[in-house]
Image: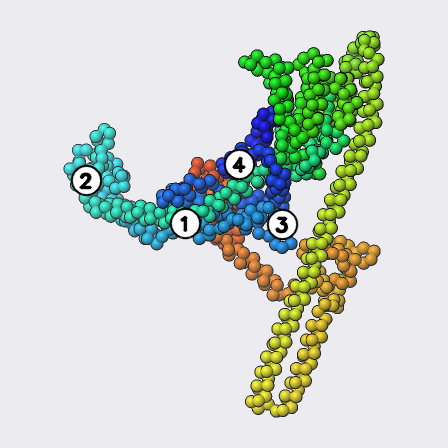
């Protein structure tokens, strides 16, 4: 597609709007590179992908792409044997978590609707759960490693806490005993060693090592000799901690290297999902639909709206071309909407051919064009000494070099900027030349000669933008089949020009022009109504056929589901009877054994008779599995909408969704099926004690599965607060005393939003930032009310 048309039709503005919905920089880069595809298969595939994503947004909500970052740099570093930073490892972990969540997101039940293209994409994702878990367990924040990363690190940090506690106790006692020599009754740190601020005149009174002095020289910072060994031990532990952290990061980096190809493959797929769902979110905002893409050069845009005009201001237009005519000549007043109309046609084609849904009505179609050429606006250049007409013609000459039968050409005010007679003649010649090459053309004009050309030429049709004489304003509606008539006399009369002046003006016009205006008036009243009715009837017929096909498919799926439910019920019943037979045989065998041990022969005969009766009973039940058990349970006498009932024919519980009709039938919902049954066939349901206990147990089990921490990294403030609020509710119901909210350090915006939410949360008793070993400023510890 030529760059000039993409710029003139402002496709780059569409891409800027879509980029706002992408989560990753790589996804935004994919949008930046977006342009029309050059083959029909790829166009239809991309349109279907975007449409599937839109349906998923409507039915299932946003996909779980939280925590997704571009990890190319980290993976490349790991592949070269480098050690990743905690921040890079966190991003790898976030990407792996997003991969696993996306794969689970696209798993579905057999009866759910399939989204083939996106499910195929999700199938390629390969979760690396072991690496994901290890990163989550080991890395607390961008700067801190968890105590749980290794037992060695845990032991070192525990020893470090004990040593620091001992040093603090000892130095506190030293401060008390030497307070008269100190500048302040406190201790401080220089480097990583505990020191005392000693007045310069008492420097010799406090034996120890001098580490620093104040800028004025009045204070020396001395490490008491009794603390040197303890400080040395602390220093050794700090070095051991650093070495262990380096070892942990190196080990994790090696595992990232081993899974590098899988990680890069997953990242590529997730970026593609980010790209597709960004397009879908934009389509949702526009209320856009998937167009039909035709290869025969015919298009029919129904209620098309320009996507860059606000919804409350844009006026939808129907534009069609290619079936009865290949050239459309649009006339009308200035600021009436002519330019917007041709820009809308061009931009919607570029969007559709780029795999974007278009703001129009269902069943709209666009044509597969290799090129869309647009000569719109005055681009004269002072530097190049080009007039309006020269600039206009320069662009047309360039366009004519490349036009073929797979081109859509849009001209705004063709032939303008020069003598009207010459300009009109030149415009007709240009249009005829391009028509002979098979191109589809839409042009706007003010020339009456071009209106007459459209009226008398086969394959060329007039159109106009409507003008309201009463309000003296354009309505912006496009009327195809009707040339724009001159409204100068009517407008002048409405504005108060005297009748005599208007009559004199009419006398200066030729009789031919007056007749032409009358012809336009007649056409406007008759032709447009007939064509509109015919097109609407055709559209309604197509919609009815589509609805019929959709409901036939739905009925077929329901029948398959019903048959499966019958088969499952029969198989289950057969298993029950088989088990009962086996159990009965076991009992009888045990009785025979007892008989051998001393029971009389008469007992054996009675046992055989009972066995025979039991066998006959079980066989009769097995034969009757396929029959309805109409007499089971108590018959329902009072039908209530929404009530639960038991349907013996399906051997399952159903919900009543309609009252009995004249034939005594009600509609019930059984799983995903809605069927009509006789009201007399329904039976009352009785919830057994075992079911009640099981439901209580399920609730209890669900609550017991609530974890003691929630990770909000990668979410924006609004999403994070929503997720944290829901988590606190679950944690409170599960009687958790203290929980951890992981928000990371970052810029602090997410931490502030979470803390603001915690201040007014009804379940929160108190909260604080984490201390060293818990996650520091990257986590908030929350104590819940009892």
Q: Which is closer to the viewer, label 3 or label 2?
A: 3
**Which residue carries the number 3 mark?**
114
The earlier-in-sequence mark between 3 and 2 is 3
The Cα–Cα distance between marks 2 and 1, rounded to whole angstroms, is 50 Å
Q: Is residue 508 visible?
A: yes
Q: Is residue 193 left or right of residue 120?
A: left
Write down the quadrant of residue 315 in the picture. Answer: top right
**Which residue carries the number 1 mark?**
258
In front: 707, or 6? 6
The Cα–Cα distance between marks 2 and 4, rounded to whole angstroms, is 62 Å
The Cα–Cα distance between marks 3 and 2, rounded to whole angstroms, is 75 Å
Q: Is residue 17 left or right of residue 501?
A: left
Single out the residue that lies furthest toward the left: 204
What label does residue 209 carry, if any? 2
Q: Are marks 2 and 4 in contact (CB under 8 Å)?
A: no
Residue depicted at 71% across the width and 69% down the height: 625
Q: Residues within 10 Å of mark 2 (few under 14, many from 20)?
A: some
Image: 46 above or below 733: above
Residue depicted at 43% across the width and 46% down the height: 260
Image: 604 above or below 258: below
**Which residue carries the number 4 mark?**
30
The earlier-in-sequence mark between 2 and 1 is 2
Q: Secondary structure at mark 3?
A: loop
Image: 65 above or below 344: below
The Cα–Cα distance between marks 3 and 1, rounded to whole angstroms, is 34 Å
């Amino acid at each position: 597609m030529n760059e000039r048309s993409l710029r003139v039709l402002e496709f780059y503005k569409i891409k800027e709007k879509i980029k706002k919905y992408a989560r990753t920089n790589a996804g935004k880069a994919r949008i930046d590179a977006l342009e029309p595809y050059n083959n029909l298969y790829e166009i239809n595939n991309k349109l279907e992908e975007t449409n599937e994503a839109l349906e998923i947004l409507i039915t299932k909500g946003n996909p779980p792409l939280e925590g997704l970052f571009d990890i190319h740099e980290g993976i490349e570093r790991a592949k070269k044997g480098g050690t990743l930073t905690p921040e890079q490892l966190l991003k790898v972990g976030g990407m792996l978590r997003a991969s696993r969540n996306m794969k689970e997101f696209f798993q579905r039940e057999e009866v759910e609707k399939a989204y083939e293209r996106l499910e195929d994409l999700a199938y390629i994702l390969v979760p690396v759960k072991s690496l994901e878990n290890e990163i989550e367990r080991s890395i607390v924040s961008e700067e801190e490693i968890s105590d749980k990363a290794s037992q060695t690190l845990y032991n070192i940090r525990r020893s470090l806490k004990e040593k620091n506690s001992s040093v603090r106790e000892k130095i506190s006692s030293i401060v008390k005993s030497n307070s008269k020599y100190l500048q302040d009754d406190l201790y401080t740190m220089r480097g990583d060693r505990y020191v005392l601020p000693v007045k310069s005149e008492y420097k010799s009174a406090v034996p120890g090592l001098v580490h620093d002095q104040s800028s004025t020289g009045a204070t020396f910072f001395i490490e008491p000799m009794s603390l040197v060994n303890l400080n040395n031990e602390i220093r050794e532990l700090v070095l051991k901690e650093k070495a262990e952290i380096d070892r942990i990061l190196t080990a994790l980096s090696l595992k990232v290297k081993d899974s590098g190809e899988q990680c890069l493959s997953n990242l590529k797929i997730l970026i593609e999902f980010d790209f597709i769902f960004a397009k879908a979110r934009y389509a949702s905002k526009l209320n856009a639909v998937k167009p039909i893409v035709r290869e025969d050069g015919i298009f029919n845009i129904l209620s098309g709206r320009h996507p860059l005009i606000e919804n409350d201001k844009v006026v939808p237009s129907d534009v069609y071309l290619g079936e009865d005519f290949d050239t459309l000549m649009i006339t009308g007043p200035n600021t009436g909407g002519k330019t917007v109309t041709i820009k809308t046609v061009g931009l919607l084609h570029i969007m559709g051919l780029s795999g974007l849904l278009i703001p129009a009505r269902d069943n709209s179609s666009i044509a597969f064009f290799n090129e869309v050429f647009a000569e719109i606006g005055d681009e004269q250049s002072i530097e190049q000494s080009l007039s309006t007409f020269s600039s206009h013609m320069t662009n047309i000459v360039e366009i004519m070099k490349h036009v073929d039968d797979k081109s859509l050409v849009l001209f705004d005010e063709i032939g303008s900027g020069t003598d009207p007679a010459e300009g009109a003649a030149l415009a007709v010649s240009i249009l005829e030349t391009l028509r002979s090459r098979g191109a589809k053309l839409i042009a706007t004009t003010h020339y009456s000669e071009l209106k007459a050309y459209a009226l008398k030429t086969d394959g060329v049709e007039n159109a106009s933008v409507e003008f309201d004489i009463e309000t003296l304003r354009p309505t912006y509606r496009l009327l195809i089949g009707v040339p724009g008539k001159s409204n100068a006399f009517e407008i002048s009369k409405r504005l108060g020009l005297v009748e005599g002046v208007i009559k004199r003006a009419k006398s200066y016009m030729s009789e031919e022009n007056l007749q032409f205006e009358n012809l336009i008036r007649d056409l406007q009243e008759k032709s447009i109504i007939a064509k509109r009715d015919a097109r609407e009837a055709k559209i309604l017929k197509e919609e009815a056929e589509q609805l019929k096909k959709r409901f036939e498919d739905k009925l077929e799926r329901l029948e398959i589901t019903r048959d499966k439910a019958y088969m499952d019920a029969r198989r289950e019943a057969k298993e029950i009877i088989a088990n009962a037979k086996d159990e009965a045989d076991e009992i009888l065998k045990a009785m025979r054994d007892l008989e051998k041990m001393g029971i009389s022969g008469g007992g054996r005969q009675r046992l055989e008779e009972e066995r025979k009766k039991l066998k006959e009973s079980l066989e009769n039940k097995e034969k009757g599995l396929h029959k309805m058990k109409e007499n089971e349970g108590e018959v329902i006498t009072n039908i209530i909408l929404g009530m639960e009932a038991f349907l013996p024919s399906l051997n399952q519980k159903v919900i009543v969704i309609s009252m009995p009709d004249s034939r005594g039938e009600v509609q019930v919902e059984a799983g995903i099926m809605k069927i009509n049954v006789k009201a007399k066939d329904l039976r009352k349901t009785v919830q057994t004690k075992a079911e009640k206990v099981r439901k209580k147990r399920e609730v209890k089990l669900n609550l017991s599965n609530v974890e003691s921490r929630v990770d909000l990294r990668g979410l924006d403030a609004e999403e994070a607060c929503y997720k944290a609020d829901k988590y606190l509710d679950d944690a409170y119901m599960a009687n958790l005393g203290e929980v951890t909210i992981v928000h990371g350090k970052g810029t602090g915006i997410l931490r502030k939003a979470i803390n603001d939410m915690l201040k007014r949360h009804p379940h929160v008793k108190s909260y604080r930032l984490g201390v060293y070993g818990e996650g520091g400023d990257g986590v908030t510890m929350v104590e819940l009310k009892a």
